[in-house]
Amino acid sequence: MTALALYLDVNESTVSKWNSNIEEPAIKSLDDIGEVFEIDNSELLHANNRVKTGLAEALQLKYKELLKAEVPKKIESTNSKGNKIMVNNPEFVKALQDFVVEYKKNKK
């Protein structure tokens, strides 16, 4: 799920590795993942009751909306060695994170 990767500000390949059980998410990411999917963390780490509001689906729609608005999901940057690399666009990440905050406010 590309929207989830951008929301968490990780590479899409990272989420793919989680889905394939090749790697596990960092503890910091577990609660954010449960929050997006609106599921208890019991399958992730610990119980945290959540009510389904459609956040995962809404986040995916917001992701598509940003792409349609031609907001780039990746931008060019320079790593510590001076090499050019592609990284998640902070504007795209912030837009998804802000969307989740507003979505939750409106669903209370």
Image (cartoon, rainbow, N blue to C red):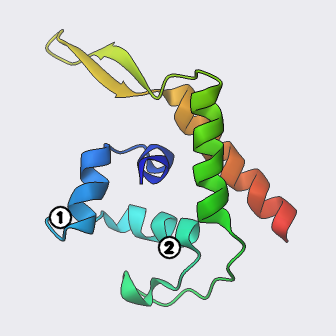
Looking at numbered disc 1 in the image, what kind of residue is underneath it?
A: Glu
Residue for point 66% across, 36% down: 65
Q: Position of residue 106 (x, y in %)?
A: 86, 61
Q: Position of residue 19 (x, y in %)?
A: 27, 67
Residue at image mark 2? 34
Q: Position of residue 54 (x, y in %)?
A: 68, 69
Q: Residues within 10 Å of mark 1 (few under 14, many from 20)?
A: few
Q: Secondary structure at mark 1?
A: loop
Looking at numbered disc 2 in the image, what kind of residue is underneath it?
A: Gly
Instruction: Give whichever of 27, 104 is nearer the camera.
Output: 104
Q: Is residue 43 left or right of residue 60?
A: left
Q: Is residue 62 left or right of residue 76?
A: right
Mark sitting earlier along the chain (1/2): 1
Residue for point 75% across, 63% down: 104
Instruction: Give whichever of 85, 52 is nearer the camera.
Output: 52
From this view, report whether residue 107 is shown above or below residue 47: above
Do tag 1 and tag 2 residues touch (Cβ < 8 Å)? no
Residue for point 56% across, 65% down: 36
Using the numbered discs, state the Cα–Cα distance from disc 1 to disc 2 in whole angstroms: 17 Å
